[in-house]
Image: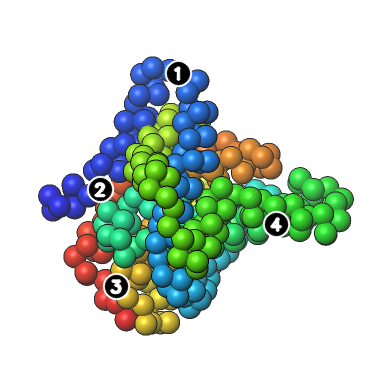
Amino acid sequence: MMALLSLAFPFFGLIFLGYFASRLTKSAQSLGWLHIFVFYVALPALFFQLVSRTPIEELANWKFIASTTFVTYCAFFVAFMVGILSSRGNIAESTIQGAVGSYSNVGYLGPGLTLAALGPAAAVPTALIFTFDNIFMFTVIPLLMALNNNEQGNSSLSAILLGVGKKVLFHPFIMATILGVTAAYFQFVPPDPIDRLIRMLSQAAAPCALFAIGITMAQRPLRRIPTELPFLIATKLLIHPALMIVVLSLVGGFSPEWFYTAILMASLPTAANVFVMAEEYKAYSERASATVFIATVMSVVTVTAILYLVTNNLIPVK
């Protein structure tokens, strides 16, 4: 139990330190720079480091990619249908609710947690899930919003697809992953000074990202709890990891580290940038803030429980 506490406490402790620091100081001026550092520098460095040191054949595990992305799609569909029912057919709001129920915090929270729990063997599956979950989200959300005429209006299909492609290709994390795959393919090793810099940035990524989550939560106070919130949070924290266990068990053939990494990634709370997307599309923004906040708080219990099951090999691997 002490080992589990030692594993989980630093991650959630950093989130709540950020929350209370922001509440006590009431200062948000530095958050922009912290976000820039985490989003554009530290986490891309971490993903480049993880991927570039991996044998290229391990990066082409399409069975794993297809299985995990399919599970994310299923969770999105369940939450989207909850949204359709609760909003009486509003596609824009339902799309954000779909993201609330399926878009795990794979960027800020995922790498630090999986690597700490499962070691370096979790690096590749973590990077693959992150990359393809983001490709899925950055593709399906703009397309659904375009169907709803929320953002794109009467733009042509080609203009919509071009905009979606740019968002996917030029995302800092995905660009870093592509560079990492290229480096792995050519077995490129950066010169020692650059490698040291990348290592320093990688080590700073998880603590800064977790602290930033806490600050973000403090700046978006809980004003309204939507009636559909319990269903959305249950989809994200319970149904998503349960579906991951079922699908990966049915497909089979995965190593324990890859199997458990996928479960941990699916169990994470909703990513904070779901609120950013809600603001961008002017749909469900206040309620998205509430669900992200509550999901993160409740994940202290659910993620810790799944960590216990994973670290003690209590979920059978098939």
For disc 1, the marked residue is 27
Residue at x 27%, y 60% (from the top left corner): 119
Give whichever of discs 4 and 1 has the lower sequence position: 1
Residue topped by disc 3: 256
Tell whether 67 sits left or right of 12: right
Q: Earlier in the sequence, mark 1 or mark 3?
A: 1
1 and 2 marks in contact (CB < 8 Å): no
Q: Judge the density around disc 3: few (<14), some (14-19), many (≥20) Cα neighbours within 10 Å.
A: some
CB contact under 8 Å: marks 2 and 3: no
Q: Provide the residue designation for mark 2.
A: 8
Measured in 3D between alpha carbons, the distance from the residue under mark 1 to the one under mark 3, in whole angstroms, is 44 Å
The residue carrying mark 4 is: 165
Secondary structure beneath dot 1 equals loop
What amino acid is at disc 4?
Answer: Gly
Q: Is 71 or 186 nearer to us in this picture?
A: 186
Of the image marks 4 and 2, the number of the one nearer the N terminus: 2
The 10 Å Cα crowd at callout 4, few under 14, some 14 to 19, many 20 or more, is some
Whole-percent x, y for residue 258 in the image: 35, 69
2 or 3: tag closer to the N-terminus: 2
Q: Residue 301 placed where, x, y %? A: 29, 49
